[in-house]
Amino acid sequence: MNIILLGPPGAGKGTQASSLVARRGMVQLSTGDMLRAAVKAETPVGLQAKAVMASGALVSDPIVSALIGERLDQGDTGSGVIFDGFPRTAAQAEALDLLLAERGQQLDHVIELTVDEAVLTERIVGRYTCAQCGEGYHDRFKQPAVAGVCDVCGSTSFKRRPDDTAETIATRMSIYRGETAPILPFYVARGLVAQVDGMADIEQVTAAIGAVLDG
Ligand code: AP5
Ligand code: MG
Ligand code: ZN
């Protein structure tokens, strides 16, 4: 089972992908996470991507498509893949079709997380992650059980993304509207798209996605 989670910044793609990983043993392929890892490791891709990401613009199609291709070849994706934050342009959608076909695979579902843009800024500026294990949290919507201590690994060190500022969010939203949302009809025409209400509580969104995958 291979699925795409599609939605604007802050829609909950990463949050839902990690729960699918925990519950179904699927593998999350987040181009955002891969690029952040590359930036941190100062690889050639990371050096190129750093400023682009900080500005909220998109990294080039060939770079991200190559990251996905390499990741698909690591041999651990047999239980299914969740594409999180990829594809984001028509060229990437075409590249994904090719990457899957070359590996004898296909797409099963495209889950569109629909959200009211007004809440997205609040979700994004309140977001932080565990510096140790990467578990995601939110100042208001998802706090650790013990304040300041990661539920998953017990670490007390957390971090925020450099692109999670109000100015950058505006750029990211407009790129979503201009470049990413227009790929939806491509998948609607193939009967792959299911809309899920991303405004519901995190658990309810998880249940709704589960219903699509099991339906
Ligand atoms: P990327 O990392 O993909 O960021 P994004 O698309 O902007 O999405 P986010 O990660 O901000 O949001 P999300 O939907 O994952 O929300 P989350 O679950 O965290 O990309 C970053 C950058 O990398 C791009 O700008 C670009 O430069 C580059 N890049 C990446 N992929 C690329 C590609 N394919 N091509 C080119 N460039 C690429 O949730 C947000 C917060 O809300 C969390 O705190 C969460 O706890 C909370 N929350 C989630 N769901 C709910 C809910 N239902 N109710 C209340 N709170 C909720
Ligand atoms: Mg994310
Ligand atoms: Zn942790």
Image: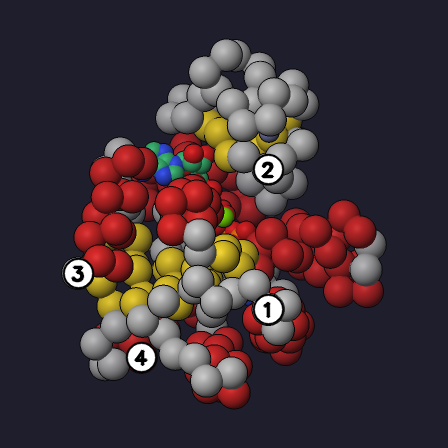
Eye-nearest disc, 4 or 3: 3
Look at mark 3 in the image and give the residue it sits on: 215
**Along the line of sight, which residue is nearer the eye, 118 or 137?**
137
What is the spatial separation of the Cα atoms under label 2 and label 1, in whole angstroms? 23 Å
Q: In the shown orientation, is residue 43 left or right of residue 31?
A: right
**Number of marks in the image?**
4
Residue 87 versus residue 99 in the image, above or below? above
The colouring scheme, among rainbow, by chain, secondary structure or one colour, is secondary structure
Q: Earlier in the sequence, mark 2 or mark 3?
A: 2
Eye-nearest disc, 2 or 3: 3
What is the spatial separation of the Cα atoms under label 4 and label 3, in whole angstroms? 22 Å
What is the spatial separation of the Cα atoms under label 2 and label 3, in whole angstroms? 31 Å
Instruction: Identify the element where label 1 is drawn.
Output: loop
Image coordinates of residue 32 in percent, x first then y, are: 58, 55
Disc number placed over residue 75 in the picture, else none? 1
What is the spatial separation of the Cα atoms under label 1 and label 3, in whole angstroms? 27 Å
Image coordinates of residue 156 in percent, x first then y, are: 65, 18
Look at mark 2 in the image and give the residue it sits on: 134
Three-letter code for the amino acid on which mark 2 is drawn = Gly
**Along the line of sight, which residue is nearer the eye, 108 or 8?**
108
Three-letter code for the amino acid on which mark 4 is drawn = Phe
Q: How dense is the environment of label 4, judged by Cα within 10 Å: few (below 14), some, or many (20 and up)? A: some
